[in-house]
Amino acid sequence: MRKDYHTIQGYGESEIIIQKSRFLTYVSRAETEQQAQNFINNIKEKHKSANHNCSAYIIGEHDNIQKANDDGEPSGTAGVPMLEVLKKQGLQDTVVVVTRYFGGIKLGGGGLIRAYGKATTEGIDAAKVVERKLHHLMKISIDYTWLGKVENEVRNSDYPLKEINYVELVEVMVFTKADEEETFINWMAEMTNGQAKVELVEKEFLEFTVN
């Protein structure tokens, strides 16, 4: 299971005009190739009258699925530079489509490469990049007499508090980074004189916005 990686927060779109040509960019997260293809097909359906709907995506823990499509533009001038932007920014599980409405002025090979690269960058900025960090959700089971101290210490720590369940023994649900479980367990034991029962519930990714 992968640990930490960068991807798109969600859907984003942008538009730029270069030499009278409109470049509309659509970006989304895609965790499978089928999701990426569905997204591309939806944009193509939306812009049937466009001159080109170029696309690129990169998917998988080891970037094992990478595709680029020029959709009628000169070979290597659209899809590949779009894919290169995704790779340069270190993004995974991301799909991008750039729709071009030709404005009557030819840009040439270099101009197209720069235009599609810029359009992709603008779309990514609109969608926002996040870092997904693997965390472990830990359940702390304690007597109610310990709740005030434990809750206060957790809220003043770097461990994100998810929720508190008020059952027979109060359950405090806290996230730890994937390599900090032992440190956390020892911290809880010291804080509660060994009275806290701590167990791993599940592994989960938390998302943090990248500036």
Image (cartoon, rainbow, N blue to C red):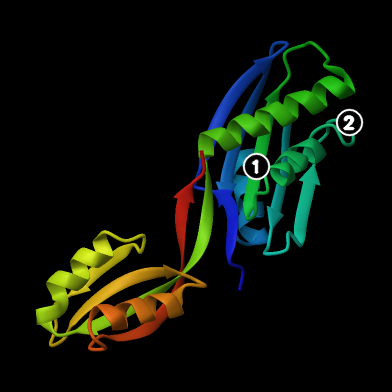
> Label 1: which residue?
96
Give the image location of residue 150, x and y in percent: 21, 72
Give the image location of residue 175, x and y in percent: 37, 68
Left or right, residue 157 beside residue 166 = right
The kind of residue tagged 1 is: Val
Q: Residue at x 58, y 66 (%)?
A: 3
56 w.r.t. 168: above or below: above
Q: Residue at x 34, y 62 (%)?
A: 160
Image quadrant in which you'd find residue 142: bottom left
Say if residue 30 shows up in the picture.
no
The kind of residue tagged 2 is: Pro
154 w.r.t. 93: above or below: below
Q: Earlier in the sequence, mark 2 or mark 1?
A: 2
Give the image location of residue 24, x and y in percent: 62, 28
Measure the C-alpha gap from mark 2 to mark 1: 18 Å
Q: Residue at x 66, y 28 (%)?
A: 119
Residue mark closest to the camera, 2 vs 1: 1
Which sits in the foreground, 1 or 25? Answer: 1
Give the image location of residue 69, x and y in percent: 79, 43
Left or right, residue 153 beside residue 121 = left
Which sits in the foreground, 164 or 80? Answer: 164
Mark 2 Cα-neighbour bin, 10 Å: few <14, some 14–19, many ≥20: few
192 w.r.t. 205: above or below: below
Left or right, residue 150 beside residue 161 = left
> Label 2: which residue?
74
- Secondary structure under tag 1 reads strand
Mark 1 Cα-neighbour bin, 10 Å: few <14, some 14–19, many ≥20: many
Which sits in the foreground, 12 or 141? Answer: 141
